[in-house]
Amino acid sequence: MHIRVINPNTTAGMTATIGEAARRIAAPGTHISATQPDAGPVSIESHFDEAISAVGVLEEVLAGEREGADAYVIACFGDPGLMAARELTRAPVIGIAEAAFHMASLISTRFSIVTTLGRTGIIAEHLLEQYGFRHHCRRVRAAEIPVLDLEENGDAALSRLIGECRRARDEDGIGAIVLGCGGMADLTDEIAREVGLPVVEGVTAAVKLTEALVGLGLGTSKHGDLAFPRPKAFFGRFAHLSEL
Ligand SMILES: NC(=O)NC1=NC(=O)NC1=O
C-alpha cells in the first residue's frame, strides 16, 4: 500500500524527519511518500498558519489522488484541512492529533499532551472536544519551544520537552503522554526512556491506523457530509479547482 504522509508546513528538514519516523514503523509492503506543499508557512504555530496551510494540504491530497495513494496522513498536530481532505478521496485520511488521541485512549484512562508553544494549546483543546476525547486528557501543556527549534536547536528543545513531560508525569495523574507536534516524530523513544511513561506520537500512530483501515478495506465514506464536493467554478488563483 502507498501512504502519502503530508507535512503541512514547508520545512523540508521536518518533512524528512516525519518521513523517516513513518518508514521506521511501516509494515513491509507499505510505501511511504513524505511530502509538503510548495507554498505556505515554514511552521504552523497559530490559527492563521493553520488556515493558510490547509490549502496546501488539500493540493497534496489532490496530487495523491492523481498518483493513486491508498491513504493520507496529515502530519501537523492541528490536523489542518482534515475534513475538507476527506471530501476529496475515498481513501482514509488521518490527522496525527486524532490518531494520537485514539491510541493514547487505548493504553491509558488519562493522558496529557505536551506541545510546542502555549498559544497552540487551544487548537489541541478544540480537537479534543471535536473528536470526543476531552474527558481523557488531563492537561494540554507546552514546552514553550518554537516549532523550528525542533529542527534547529534540537538538544535544547529535547531538554525542555523532557522537563515538561516529567512534570506531566508527576503532577497530572496520567498513564501516558501525547507528543503535540509532527516535528517530535523522532523523539518518542528517548522521551519515553527518560520519563518512564508510554509516549504516543501522532505520525507513527496515524501510519499504523491507516494501515489498519486499508487492511480492513475501509475508507472515507462518501455518504453524507464527506461526499465529493459539488462541482462549481473557482476563480483567481484557485481556478484550477474548477475541474475537480
Ligand atoms: N502544535 C504544533 O506544534 N503543531 C505543528 N506545527 C507544525 O509546523 N507542525 C506541527 O505539528
Image (cartoon, helix red, strand yellow):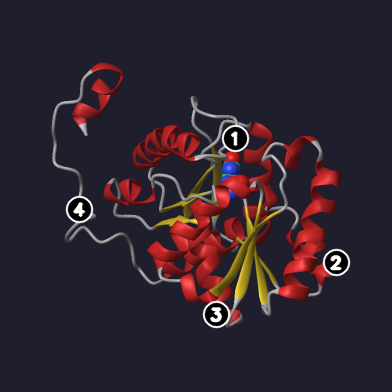
Label 2 close to label 1 by CB (< 8 Å): no
Q: Which residue: 79% across, 62% down?
A: 191
Q: Seen in the image, is 26 located left or right of residue 191? A: left
Question: Any mark on residue 43, and which?
Answer: 1
- In front: 123, or 67? 123
In the image, residue 200 lies at what x, y percent?
A: 64, 66
Q: Residues within 10 Å of mark 2 (few under 14, many from 20)?
A: few
What's the amino acid at mark 3?
Leu
| Sequence-wise first label, 3 or 1 | 1
Amino acid residing under circle 4:
Ala
Question: At which x and y percent is residue 11?
Answer: 62, 32
- Distance from disc 2 to disc 1, alpha carbons, whole Å, reads 27 Å
Residue 153 appears in which quarter of the rendering?
Answer: top right
Task: Give the residue pinned by disc 3.
Answer: 106
**Which of the two marks, 3 or 1, is nearer to us in this view?**
1
Beta carbon at label 1 within 8 Å of ligand 1: yes
| Residue located beneath label 4 in the image | 227
Q: Nearer the N terminus, badge 1 or badge 4? A: 1
